[in-house]
Image: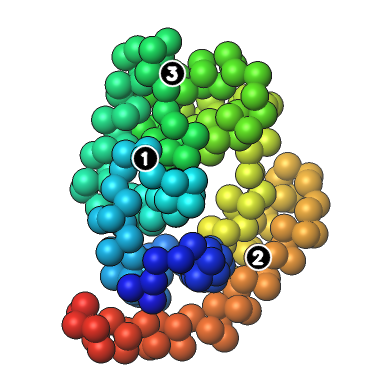
Amino acid sequence: MEKETEIDPWEVFFQIMSFLSGKLPKESNAYKYLMKYMAFLGKNQYERLGFNDVGTMIDKIKREYFLSLFCKVQDKTCIGNATEHFQAWMEDPKNVDIPPNLRNVVYYYGVRLGGVKEWDFLYSQYNETKDPYTKNKILYGLSATNDPWITDRFDNNPTLAYLNVVSRLTTGFDTLYALSEFQRFQAQIEVSDESALKSIRERIKWLEKHEKEIEDVLEELLKKNHQM
């Protein structure tokens, strides 16, 4: 797979890997091994495509996939480029524009590695734009903050609080303890969301059945390819 250049196999690859990474707890060995193995397979394409918005439309689509992956695994070049693009845009928003296929990565890591100033700037862009597609990308970027004070403002804003509240909860609940905490939270606010509870229960069962097996397979693949 690491020598594959066509887009179709990579799209299938990223769909499968996205499913797995969404299921696995971020602190688990299985998740860490998955990210490491994905980066190993994608290294050639990532280095070929780079960060600049050039090439064919297929190249631009593939670039978005690989930049998302390599920034997620904390590749210094990827993160550095993303934050530099964000800062340049923030300093001169009228004359600097982020290419559409780079926006998810630039918005997300500009906010993730920034502070209140970066978050407020991106929120001002959300209010200024009329394009729903761009608004969705900005909302994704706004959700990247882990600053408690910003998060409080985020949760108290009806427009922003809608952004993935339940899905963010359910994807983070991997244990029976977390399930009981979510149920307690529901009782406190007098909200009953059976679909959210069902999602949590299903995820716990899935992890109990598959997590160790996935960890073992990925560990073996990494060792086989001299990545461990």
Q: Quadrant where the C terminus lies?
A: bottom left
Q: Which amino acid does label 1 sit on?
A: Val
In the image, residue 99 sits, relative to residue 51, either above or below, namely above
- Of callouts 2 and 1, the N-terminal one: 1
Q: Is residue 175 left or right of residue 48?
A: right
Front-lying residue, 209 or 173 = 209
Residue named by callout 1: 54
Q: What residue type is labelled 2?
A: Ile
For marks 2 and 1, give the CA distance. Answer: 42 Å
Q: What residue type is labelled 3?
A: Phe
Any mark on residue 121, and which? 3
- Of callouts 3 and 1, the N-terminal one: 1
Q: For mark 3, give the secondary structure.
A: helix
* Rendering quarter of residue 107: top left
Q: For mark 2, give the secondary structure.
A: helix
Mark 1 crowdedness (10 Å alpha carbons): few <14, some 14-19, many ≥20: few
Front-lying residue, 224 or 164 = 224
For marks 2 and 3, give the CA distance. Answer: 34 Å
Mark 2 crowdedness (10 Å alpha carbons): few <14, some 14-19, many ≥20: many
Q: For mark 1, give the secondary structure.
A: loop
Residue named by callout 2: 200
Q: Is residue 36 visible?
A: no
